[in-house]
Amino acid sequence: MLRFLIMRILGAIPLLLLLSVVTFAIIQAPPGDYGDTIRSMLINQGGAAPTVAEAQAELYREAHGLNDPIIVQYFRWIGGIVTRFDFGHSFFYNKDVGIVVAERLPATIALALTCHLLASLLGIGLGILAATRQYSWVDTGLGIISFLGMTIPRFLLAIIILYFLVFRLNVSEVGMFFSARYGGAPWSWDKFVNLVQHVWPVVFIATFGGLAYNMRVMRANLLDVLNSQYVETARAKGLPEGAVIMKHAVPNALHPLVAYQGVVLPYMLTGEIEVAIVFGLATVGPAIVGSMGVGDVYVTATFMLVLAATLIVGNIISDLLLVALDPRIRLGGGSE
């Protein structure tokens, strides 16, 4: 097990470096940089003449190395990460990128993990319920819910909920985690309830999509397993139907869903990103979109690198879960 973890971590390092190169090149591909944002702000908000604004923008580019070749900018960024754990300076937020990440990533991961746990538990449970009641009204109703969850775009569902909250229910505190009175208050039960009241749309929408996928996969897998010969043998031995399903069928039907956990965390993060952008929460989503819009390249590249790292970590976790679920599986093709 330890050898497997070490090998996977070592193998992830060159993969992350390659992904950083590709990501940085794609981000830098469109024309323009943050100097153009400076020029636009000076003209539109400061009333400066175009020539003066362009001169100021050029001075900003020279001071922050934006005129350097892309390869020089990349090695300056990646070199700072490797040698000093320095992700660069954010032009838009005017602070270290590490601080921007530290401000937004924990809340994003907490939301994503909450949605993932709810989607997994509810999806697997409802999938078992649908499979054991095949073609019943329960199966039909759950199938409709699953279809809606997989077909309705998350951003559209977020806009609909936002419309009803703001224009029908007159909710004013949208786009924040807490009410003003709880901003700097220590944690308490009232503060937790206030947090739930603010973030439930994000949790509901992201959970709805993941739940639908888990339900459909679990139902299909369990139906296949229930028709297997060893399940029929267990029934022939006189075991209760509940024991046959939960002890023999469900563990084997879970294998594809466990393997799916390798990609689900980045998927839940991106699902949170879509909804958070609509609701304007201070999470990773608005930071990525905002930094891309103004050319804040180091913020965008760092968050993309974080998403790539979550994909790698998720795959390692899924491999470990598969071993825990089925001891016959050997990591790395060898003995544990």
Image (cartoon, rainbow, N blue to C red):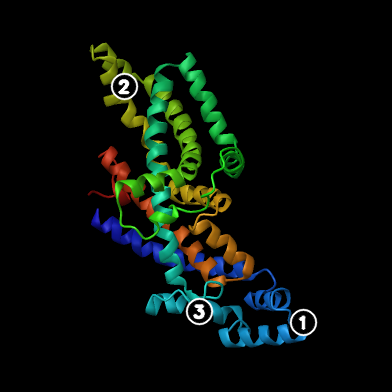
Q: Quadrant of residue 164?
A: top right
Q: Is residue 44 toward the left or the right of residue 333 in the image?
A: right
> How far, Cα to Cα, is label 1 from label 3?
33 Å
Which element type, helix, strand or loop, lies under badge 1?
Answer: helix
Three-letter code for the amino acid on which mark 3 is drawn: Phe
- Reading the image, the residue beneath label 2 is 245
Residue 75, label in figure? 3
> How far, Cα to Cα, is label 2 from label 3?
55 Å
In x, y percent, where is residue 155? 59, 45
Which element type, helix, strand or loop, lies under badge 2?
Answer: helix
In x, y percent, where is residue 111? 42, 49
Local crowd at mark 1 within 10 Å, few (<14), some, or many (≥20)? some
Q: Quadrant of residue 48?
A: bottom right
Q: Is residue 81 visible?
A: yes
Is 322 drawn above or below residue 178 in the view shown? Answer: above
Local crowd at mark 3 within 10 Å, few (<14), some, or many (≥20)? few
Three-letter code for the amino acid on which mark 2 is drawn: Ile
Three-letter code for the amino acid on which mark 1 is drawn: Pro
Which one is closest to the eye, mark 1 or mark 3? 1
**Is there CB contact under 8 Å for labels 2 and 3?**
no
Q: How many marks?
A: 3
Q: Is residue 196 toward the left or the right of residue 248 in the image?
A: right
In x, y percent, where is residue 330? 28, 45
**Viewer-proximal residue, 270 or 158?**
158
**Is there CB contact under 8 Å for labels 2 and 1?**
no
- Reading the image, the residue beneath label 1 is 50
**Viewer-proximal residue, 55 or 188?**
188
Which element type, helix, strand or loop, lies under badge 3?
Answer: helix
Of label 1 and label 3, which has the lower sequence position? Answer: 1
